[in-house]
Amino acid sequence: MNYELREMLPSDEIRVLEIFRQGVDGGIATLETEVPTPEAWSMEYFNDCRWVLENENNEVIGWCALKPVSKRECFKGVAEVSIYFDNEYQGKGLGSVLLKKIILDSEDHGFWTLQTNIFSENEMAIKSHQKNGFRVVGVRKKMGKLNDEWKDLVLMEKRSEII
């Protein structure tokens, strides 16, 4: 199967949020329980470093984007990575395609550290990040509740070797 990696366009917003909805419904990707409006989603993420992966039918099957971890100037080069895939395309090793691209793009845009919080039971995502140079910083016990169940988050980071 052929895939194309390209920059996210405003016209991708609906599909991006549909995929995010699948992540919300799946229960192991996010503590969020509601899908934001396209405007709210766009304001949460940096305008740069937004990518989508398309299948051979030009359908967006996955996306990645960066959001700030803090508004403080001293953390301007630190961003949180979000990667989501359509349920049909999970577990096919495609996460590395988006992760490698966003790592390179983040360095081009001056980010020196990328971080992510992954549910402890999402072993596939943890392994994908480790394979792409992320290290486990620690496990954040009972960081939030989802459906009345406490969730542990694995905090992972990757420090740029060039910035």
Image (cartoon, rainbow, N blue to C red):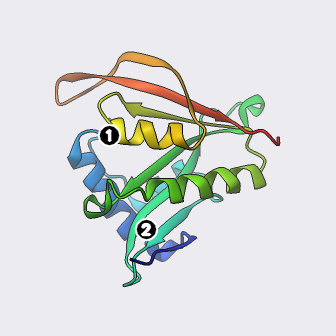
Give the labeled residue for mark 1.
32
Residue 148 or 118: which is nearer the viewer?
118
| Quadrant position of the C terminus in the picture | top right
Query: Label 2's element?
Result: helix
Q: Residue 15 location, x and y as percent?
A: 36, 69
Tell me the quarter of the picture where residue 16 sits.
bottom left
Farthest bottom residue in view: 57
Amino acid at the residue labelled 2: Glu
Amino acid at the residue labelled 1: Glu
Badge 2, how many Cα within 10 Å: few under 14, some, many 20+? some
Q: Residue drawn at (71%, 30%), measured in percent from left and top?
A: 72
As drawn, 28 above or below 154: below
Give the labeled residue for mark 2.
13
Mark drawn on residue 46: none
Residue 127 or 157: which is nearer the viewer?
127
Q: Is 4 positioned to the left or the right of 70 in the image? A: left
Tell me the quarter of the picture where residue 157 sits.
top right
Q: Is 158 positioned to the left or the right of 92 in the image? A: right
Look at the numbered discs 1 and 2 and tell me whether their residues touch, using CB distance below 8 Å: no
As drawn, 62 above or below 137: below
Q: Residue 138 location, x and y as percent?
A: 49, 18
